[in-house]
Amino acid sequence: MSEMVLETTDLVAGYLPGVNILNGCNVHVGKGELVGIIGPNGAGKSTLLKAIFGQVNIRSGSVMLNGDNITGLKADKLVSKGVGMVPQNNNVFPSLTIEENLQMGIYQEPKMYKPRLDFVTSLFPELGKRLKQRAGSLSGGERQMVAMSRALMMEPSVLLLDEPSAGLSPVRQDETFINVAAINRAGVSIMIVEQNARRALQICNRGYVLDQGTDAYTGTGRDLMKDPKVIELYLGTLATDQEKSKESS
């Protein structure tokens, strides 16, 4: 097993008193891994990321980062310890330029700005050419690049991505998944929550299927895509039809 970067153990969490969304959730991300979290609506996928990032009350269980207990820490502390988070909505400052958004991402360590800017613009060269452009004038896919770049500015040990393809056109969705894979190849460990389960599993080393707030199934991305029960319950007839098409071709 690769060196453990992020691990949740028996995580129980929720928004309202007495109502748990996560019910003993166990997931982990190894060094350099890209791990996908899929499952039906209401399974607790986004809640898992928010609990890790200190935005949901954890009632029991633990979150460990590189061997340190970070359970219940607030977002600013988590960022300084090495957790990057890209939320699904409102993930850029639209009135600020791309450059100012990136500066906001590294306000805790301003001296690191230049080397980190070089890193993110090596991943997204187009951003480097448009640093003075306001983020509000960008397309949805371009905003997603800015949001991911801003989260990468603090050189996180793990990057949490909440539904990065949501609301994008099919072409922009493909670009987003390509970008996520590129970030991972650059050495960043990633946990990605996605409704586009099949596409997410295609790029993931491992995946977890969440159901009713717990990890119901786990395996490699490839194995989960082929698992009949996962296909039936979570990937739908689209995956089944595509597999049949491949077999007949």
Image (cartoon, helix red, strand yellow):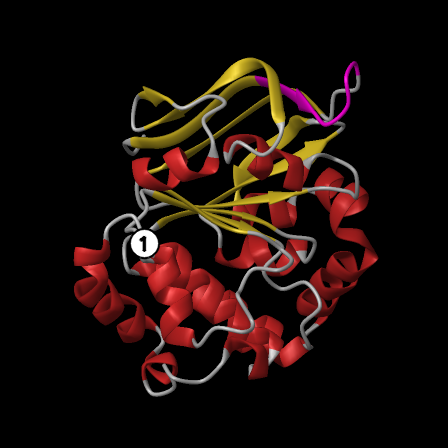
- Closer-to-camera residue (237/132): 132
Relative to 119, residue 56 above or below: above
Local crowd size for mark 1, using a 10 Å CA cut-off: few (<14), some (14–19), many (≥20): few
- Closer-to-camera residue (181/92): 92
Relative to 24, residue 211 above or below: below
Residue at image location 36% in from the left, 74% down from the top: 99
Residue at image location 50% in from the left, 36% down from the top: 53
- Left or right of 1? Residue 147 is right
Quadrant (top left/top right/bottom left/bottom right) for the C terminus: bottom right
- Residue 83 location (% of width, % of height): 39, 41
Number of on-image labels = 1
Q: Residue furthest front?
A: 95
Residue at image location 61% in from the left, 61% down from the top: 199
- Residue 211 location (% of width, % of height): 73, 31
- Left or right of 124? Residue 238 is right
Please check the rendered image and state whether residue 15 is part of the magenta-colored stretch, yes or no.
Answer: yes
Q: Quadrant of residue 239?
A: bottom right
Relative to 57, residue 40 above or below: below
Relative to 159, residue 215 above or below: above
- Closer-to-camera residue (57/44): 57
- Left or right of 31? Residue 78 is right
Would you name the residue on which mark 1 appears? 107
- Residue 15 location (% of width, % of height): 72, 27
* Amino acid type shown at disc 1: Tyr
Whether residue 82 is visible, yes or no, is no
Whether residue 7 is visible, yes or no, is yes
Q: Residue furthest bottom?
A: 129
Quadrant (top left/top right/bottom left/bottom right) for the N terminus: top left
Residue at image location 31% in from the left, 35% down from the top: 81
Local secondary structure at mark 1: loop
Range shown magenta: 11-18
